[in-house]
Structure formats: C-alpha cells, structure tokens
Amino acid sequence: MTMPATKQPPVVRRRYALLLALWDSDYATKVYGGYHNVFVSAFGSGAGDERWDSYRVIAGEFPSPDDLSSYDGFVVSGSPHDAHGEDPWVHRLCALLRTLHAMGKRVLGVCFGHQLLCRALGGKVARARSGWDVGVRNVTFARGLIDNGGLGGELLVLPTSAAIVEVHQDEVWEIPPGAAVVAYSEKTRVEAFVVGENVLGIQGHPEYTTDILLNLVDRLAGQNAIDGSVGDEARRTVAVTGGPDRAFWTGLCKGFLRGGLKSGGATDAKGVNVNARAAAAGVAVGSCFAGGAPMVQLACRAGIN
C-alpha cells in the first residue's frame, strides 16, 4: 500500500527580530492580535519561509548576544517613551543597536526606532520644534543624488513624495556621522535617513493602517496627550489624502530588509500602479543608496507626485 506523502513545512530561509518598544493596545490586540502581527503583516513575505521573533524590549526582553548573528535583519518599533530618555532599557537598546551596526546587520527603525537609531549612532534627538505631528503627511524624497546599488538589486520605483502616518512629538535634530537625510516634510526636517547600506530610519509609521491611526488619535485625545484641535487636524488629513501610501512604504521596507528593492506591479494604497505611474512620467531609477561615498545617498530621479 502506498502511503500518502506528508507535506513538509517550508524551509525557513530568513529570520528577523522585532524589537517591540511598546505594549499592545487593546485595539491592536482585539483587531490584529497585537503589534507583532501588525509588523509581520506589513513587512513579512507571507510565503512561510521567514521566521519573525518578537522581543519586548520595553520590558527588558532582548535577544541573546549569541543569537544576533542568526538574524538577517532587525526592526525597532515605535514607543510612547522618549528616545532621548534615560530609561535603563533605552540605554540597553542603544547599545544593542550599536552592536548590530558594527556587525553589519540590517536595522530598520520606525518612529521611536528611527530616533533611537539616530541617538545610538551619534546623532541628536529632542522634542519637535513645531510640536506634535499626528495624521497623514506627504513626505518628499531627496532628489538628484548619485546612485550606486547600495540596497542591491533593482530599485522599487521611487516617487517624488508619498503619504505616511505620523504620530510623534520628538524628532531628529542632528543625524549621525556618516548619515544622509533621504526624505523630509514641511513639518519634519528628517523624515528618513540612512547610514551605510544597513541602517534605515523612518520617522513615520509604514506599518500603520488608517484605522490604527484613528484609534490612536482618539486615545491620545481622551488622555489629553494632544489637544482636540490636533486630533481634528489628524482626522482631516486622512480625509484629504485618502490615507497613507502604505503599499509603497511596506514594499520599500520589505526590500530594505531583504537586501534589495525590486520593481514590480505593486499598487499604492490608492490602487494606482506605482510602476505605471513611473513609466508614464518617463522615470528610470537604478538604485536607492550609494555605497561608495562616505554618506550613503538616495537615488531619486523620480518625477511623479
């Protein structure tokens, strides 16, 4: 008798560590099963060949030093805490980020993570000069810079600007030595920066959906953390922009974590094919970061908006 073949589990080809600097909100737990699932849904391949391990660094839970080399990349989440604060776990996380950078590991920092990467690598973070930034904001990418294959592979077509969820009252004041600002907005001078080919900080929340933002706005307003007018403006930006360009941002982050941004047929959050928009504009972008110069630079010859 022939026995039916057993289905083998997929081989884990990549392993990532999610460094959670926040607690799960009731909403994130109820709707998504927690922020681990929010991040993995946003940045994971979905193919079953990846393993994502979460460490609640806000509670002092960190990966073992002996295990660091087994990871292909690390993601540092947002947090209600200050990246310029003196909490012991914040200092410990700074030390870990310096270690990962020295090892050449790919590290993506989001919001608080973006700010803490800056601090850990020698930059300066403080309260935002213009106060809270909450809502959906258009971020502009730096233009006219030299490209040289830093992220590897073919680049995901880069727009002139893209909308992203913002929820922060701190910001980067000075980037680390050897870093380059690759995106900015009318509200925040450093929306994204890179250091070498392995560090990417994004001030906004590429992982957030519109419903997560709106729930967070309601919670912040209910806690009197933000004025009612700030909450009203945040809701207005959602209506005006139509929401974040989440497909673009998650695609960019996925490409970074996997070592190369490749063009394809992806659409942005508004259902517009990004590559079609680029082709219509006569855009050709070869590579995102320059690896040869002291300051890694963003290749942005895109002409779409």
Image (cartoon, rainbow, N blue to C red):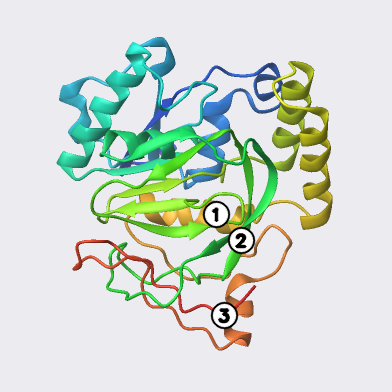
Relative to 276, does residue 63 appear above or below in the rendering?
above
SS for tag 2?
Answer: strand
Residue that lies at the very extreme toward the front in this rendered image:
129
Identify the residue position indicated by label 2 in the image: 162
Q: Amino acid at mark 2?
A: Ala
Task: Identify whether 139 is placed above or below 200.
Answer: below
Given contact means CB atoms under 8 Å apart, are the residues at marks 2 and 1 in contact? yes
- Picture quarter with the N terminus: top left
What residue is drawn where x is 51% and y is 25%?
A: 79
Find numbered disc 1 in the image and state the secondary structure of the residue it sits on.
helix
Is 72 or 182 nearer to us in this picture? 182
Task: Give the mark, 3 or 1, whose residue is nearer the N terminus.
Answer: 1
**Residue 69 position within the rendered picture, expressed as x and y whole percent measured from the top left:** 18, 34
Mark pair 2, 1: CA separation? 8 Å
The amino acid sitting under disc 1 is Trp
Residue receiving disc 3: 303
Above-or-below relation of 304 to 12: below
Q: Amino acid at mark 3?
A: Gly
